[in-house]
Image (cartoon, rainbow, N blue to C red):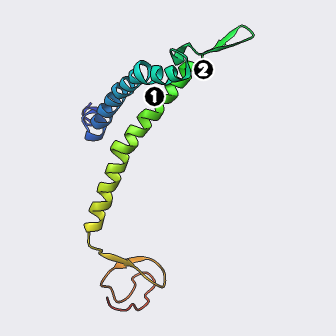
Amino acid sequence: MGGFKKFLLRGNLVELAVAVVIGTAFGALVTTLVSSFITPLIAAIGGKPDFTALYFTLNGSKFTYGVFLNALLSFLIIAAVVYFLVVKPVGALLDRTSRTKEATERDCPACLSEIPIRATRCKFCTSELPAT
């Protein structure tokens, strides 16, 4: 029972649960934004009052492609927000922090293994190296 409790209280699991809940709420918010504001705005330009009313019938079956267009717009907006507000800033932050680190290793010119920067002999292929 102690192992299960430890598993549940582990940091990654709690963070993942919070991310899923926030992501679900954000998805619902964006879906509502698209169906309430963006779709009617785009549809007004095209002459239709709402995308959800768009459909075609084939052999008595109704295909509501307007609902798909709403879902597609929601997906594209969510993807753009995640990319521009999460992925790009985190990538820029990681690039900035990695630039400030001083190099501690280099590649051996003979075998291309990583070795300490001040090494004079490769520990893998034993080649003599020029001092840095």
Residue at image location 43% in from the left, 81% down from the top: 124
Residue at image location 59% in from the left, 16% down from the top: 54
**Which residue lies under the disc numbered 2?**
65
**Residue 23: x percent and y percent?**
35, 31
Residue at image location 47% in from the left, 31% down from the top: 75
Left or right, 35 with respect to 85, comes to right
Distance of label 2 from label 1 (alpha carbons): 14 Å
Q: Quadrant of residue 32 in the image?
A: top left
Relative to 110, residue 47 above or below: above
Mark 1 Cα shell of 10 Å, populated few (<14), some (14-19), many (≥20): many
Element marked by disc 1: helix
Left or right, 47 with respect to 41, comes to right
Q: Which mark is residue 132?
A: none
The answer to which of marks 2 and 1 sits earlier in the sequence is 2
Mark 2 Cα shell of 10 Å, populated few (<14), some (14-19), many (≥20): some
**Residue 104: x percent and y percent?**
29, 75
Element marked by disc 2: helix
**Residue 60: x percent and y percent?**
72, 7
Farthest residue in the top direction? 60
The three-letter amino acid code for the residue at tag 2 is Tyr
The three-letter amino acid code for the residue at tag 1 is Ser
Q: Which mark is residue 74?
A: 1
Q: Quadrant of residue 30 in the image?
A: top left
Q: Can you say which quadrant of the picture contains the N terminus?
A: top left
Residue at image location 29% in from the left, 40% down from the top: 12
Q: Can you say which quadrant of the picture contains the C terminus?
A: bottom left
Relative to 1, residue 60 above or below: above
Q: Quadrant of residue 130 in the image?
A: bottom left
Total numbered badges shown on the rendered structure: 2
Left or right, 80 with respect to 57, comes to left
